[in-house]
Image (tube, helix red, strand yellow):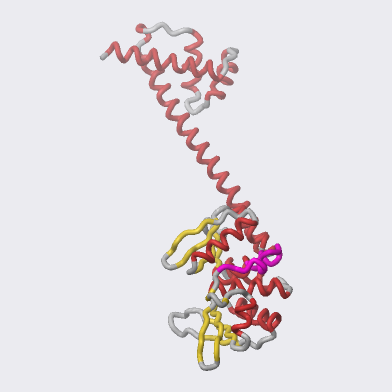
């Protein structure tokens, strides 16, 4: 089971009262339902590949509106694709749509009624319904953090975005073919959305994976930094050893102080040592207390003297 399916399964398991169920039904219908007219009158059809969502919607319709929806399975025999589950409402279809504010005298509305999202629990339920209808979330173990919900209606996408902002979820909207996609990228905000939906188990799994990934990424950055510093130290040491070789090959051309000679000897003995390690070795061998900046100054002096000898020989 994908991480998205697991989240949706947990949302469907959460108990809902009558008002929360109405808010979820409204979101499911606005995001994905279709309306039909035939000789029997108006009907509403909702289709999904997720059997849990189909059963959840079926039960909520019975609970809230006391109707008997038709639940059917459309088997797909080609390419081993998933079956489709269809929930159809014939009885009271127009009454249900009117109660949800979807179908009014002025036409079809793709913006949720204020009374359906005014309270905190109904607003949360509406967002849960939106995610059930068209939401997806990347598995935090295998992909970048990403949560999205899509709709063909720009007005509905903006309404979902504004509702998410109520909960300090800075969702953005992008166009993808015919769909308006409302999405979150920040890992902590996706965790907040899971918390909003009461998907506790999925939240725990997401946060656990996020902590592990962030820790691993931080360790990788530190390792990369250490490798870069090591390479920088080795490159500098190589140039210093080359300068020392030039000075030793031309003793008559330059006057080298005793302290500089101490540094030259220690660098030859410890070609891979860092600045701090060189300071310690100089003190250990000669009793000369030297700071890191002092060591840097003496090494730079060695390179300067070697460079002057090379210039004279050109």
Q: Main secondary structure of the magenta part?
A: helix
Decide: is 221 above or below 305: below
Say which residue appears at 58% left-offset and 21% top-offset: 280
In the rendered structure, the answer to whether residue 145 lies left or right of residue 300 reads right
x and y, in percent, of residue 56 in the image: 65, 78
Q: Which residue is drawn at 64% across and 56% down?
A: 166
Quadrant position of residue 20 = bottom right
Q: Which of 90 and 139 is in front in this view?
A: 90
Q: Toward the viewer: 43 or 314?
A: 43
**Which quadrant is home to the N terminus?**
bottom right
Is-magenta flag for residue 123? yes
- Residue 259 in the figure: left or right of residue 54: left
Q: Position of residue 45 (x, y in %)?
A: 55, 82
Q: Position of residue 198 (x, y in %)?
A: 69, 64
Can residue 138 be seen at all in this image of the molecule? no
Q: Report the magenta residues as a range.
A: 111-126
Residue situated in front as seen by the camera: 57 or 4: 57
């Amino acid at each position: 089971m994908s991480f998205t399916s697991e989240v949706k399964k947990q949302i469907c398991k959460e108990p809902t009262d009558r008002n929360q169920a109405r808010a979820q039904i409204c979101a499911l219908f606005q995001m994905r339902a279709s309306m039909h007219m035939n000789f029997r009158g108006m009907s509403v059809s909702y289709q999904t590949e997720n059997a849990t969502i189909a059963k959840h919607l079926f039960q909520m319709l019975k609970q809230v509106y006391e109707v008997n929806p038709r639940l059917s399975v459309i088997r797909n025999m080609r390419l081993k694709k998933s079956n489709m589950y269809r929930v159809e409402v014939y009885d009271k279809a127009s009454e249900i749509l009117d109660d949800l504010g979807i179908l009014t005298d002025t036409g079809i509305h793709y913006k949720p009624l204020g009374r359906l999202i005014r309270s905190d629990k109904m607003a949360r339920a509406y967002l849960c319904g939106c995610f059930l209808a068209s939401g997806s979330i990347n598995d935090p173990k295998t992909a970048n953090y990403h949560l999205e919900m899509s709709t063909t209606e720009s007005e509905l996408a903006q309404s979902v975005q504004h509702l998410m902002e109520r909960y300090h979820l800075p969702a953005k909207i992008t166009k993808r073919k015919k769909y308006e996609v409302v999405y979150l990228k920040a890992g902590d905000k996706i965790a907040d959305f899971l918390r909003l939906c009461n998907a506790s188990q999925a939240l725990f799994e997401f946060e656990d994976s996020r902590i592990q990934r962030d820790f691993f990424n931080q360790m990788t950055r530190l390792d990369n930094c250490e490798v870069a510093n090591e390479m920088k130290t080795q490159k500098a040491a190589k140039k210093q050893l080359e300068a020392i070789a030039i000075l030793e090959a031309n003793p008559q051309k330059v006057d080298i102080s005793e302290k500089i000679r101490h540094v030259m000897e220690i660098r030859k003995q410890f070609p891979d040592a860092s600045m701090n390690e060189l300071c310690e070795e100089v003190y250990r061998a000669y009793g000369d207390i030297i700071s890191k900046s002092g060591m840097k100054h003496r090494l730079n002096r060695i390179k300067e003297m070697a460079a002057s000898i090379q210039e004279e020989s050109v």
